[in-house]
Image: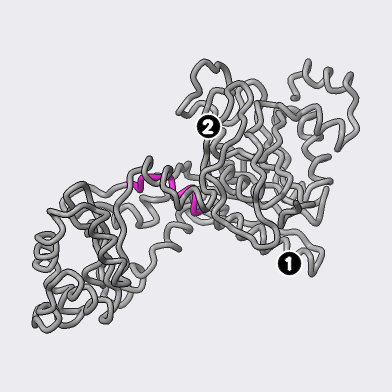
Amino acid sequence: MQRPLEGIRVLSVTGALFGPYCGMLLADLGAEVIKVERPVYGDMNREWGPFFPNVQGPDKSGYFVSIHRNHKGITLNLKNPKAKEILKELVKKSDVLIENFKPGTLDEWGIGYEELKKVNPRLIYACGSGFGHYGPYSQWPSYDIIGQAMGGFMDLNGWPDKPPCRAGSSIGDIIAGMFLCIGILAALRYRDITGKGQKIDVAQMDSMIAVLENAVIRYTLEGKPPTRIGAKHPTITPFDVFKAKDGYVVIAVGNEAIWKRFCTAIGKPEWIDDPRFATNQLRCKNESILKSLIEEWTQDKTRWDIAKLLLSHDIPSAPVYNVAEAVEDPHTKAREMIVEVEQPQYGKVRIAGCPIKFSETPIKVFKPAPLLGQHTEEVLTSLLGYTKDQIEALRREGAI
């Protein structure tokens, strides 16, 4: 069955998470994504756990598998002149190149945007980095935690009496990877209209600032920076995590109509006219008092008893799941958000599926991540017409 990006070819010259996550999204959407890795060692994330039991060498990483489904994989030593020529030949036959090296690295190697657009003026050259390709910090090295730190996110995340906290997943990479994917899709549309390719520059720090939500406008209007306040919402109450008998439950009272339904549902109709809680502004002012009163009601009930009661009154509520509960939930399964792939050298493995659901071009096929260099020969012969003897010579020279 055709997928939305069928016919688009992407070269993913990427490492770690930022670039590969973008490549995975494009691959899920149907693009032919060719992962370019260094010979012998591959992507740095092949050394990141968890690891498959009884699998040795560069294909042992479950982390790599989790973000490289639906890819083809080749190896090129991009410091080797012949490998650079191969990359340029592939660029001629490709629509997009993704890279997330330190800005300027591929320029130094002679395969930056200015060089590659001479080879293919229609090329979309998508760059991901910590701080972007210009600006005073552009040459600083970065990982996810750096973007979260300098984008203002970490200072918003955690509890007031604790140090700033990194999010539980690498959202500095993941969100930046999503923005890079969006940029690529927009550039493809622009190219459809004009025939012109272009360079895309997405930074982790920029991406974190972009998702600060109302924190930026609160700072600009109030003149002081918002900081971490735990799980509660900064301007809506009650909108928080509450202690239950078997864990924690979320209750989100987003407007006055829901507040009235909430008070009635839990048997506290007198709160509706209580002068401490009569408006959202007053509830925010008296948040600690209200939370204590709500937890007197929640603490002897299970998460699901609370959530089901509130949901029956159309009040947003949910148990706080751990990862296992989220993965095994029947709704997760109904939405096909956990998919099974047959991974070479290991067998069946479950990974997260794609959250984008299409009515006409559903994403149903998930192929395993490539072994290191698995498709090198296939790509060089089918796309570039290399012979087996030429390929063997390239291997002996360390180009592939």
Query: Where is residue 368 shown, x and y percent of the image?
Result: 63, 34
Q: Quadrant of residue 386?
A: top right
Mark 2: which amino acid?
Asn
Q: Quadrant of residue 213?
A: bottom left
Mark 1: which amino acid?
Tyr
Mark sitting on residue 190: 1
Using a 10 Å C-alpha cutoff, classify the residue at mark 1 as few (fewer than 14 neighbours), some (14 to 19) or many (20 or more): some
> Viewer-proximal residue, 177 or 56?
56
Count of numbered circles on the image: 2
In the image: residue 388, left or right of residue 240 = right
Q: Eyeballing the image, is 20 above or below 395?
A: below
Please report the bounds of the magenta region as a residue range.
Answer: 166-176
Say which label, 1 or 2, has the lower sequence index: 2
- Which residue matches tag 2? 45
Q: Residue at x 63, y 34 (%)?
A: 369
In the image: residue 252, left or right of residue 182 = left
Tell me the element at label 1: helix
Q: Residue at x 45, y 42 (%)?
A: 143
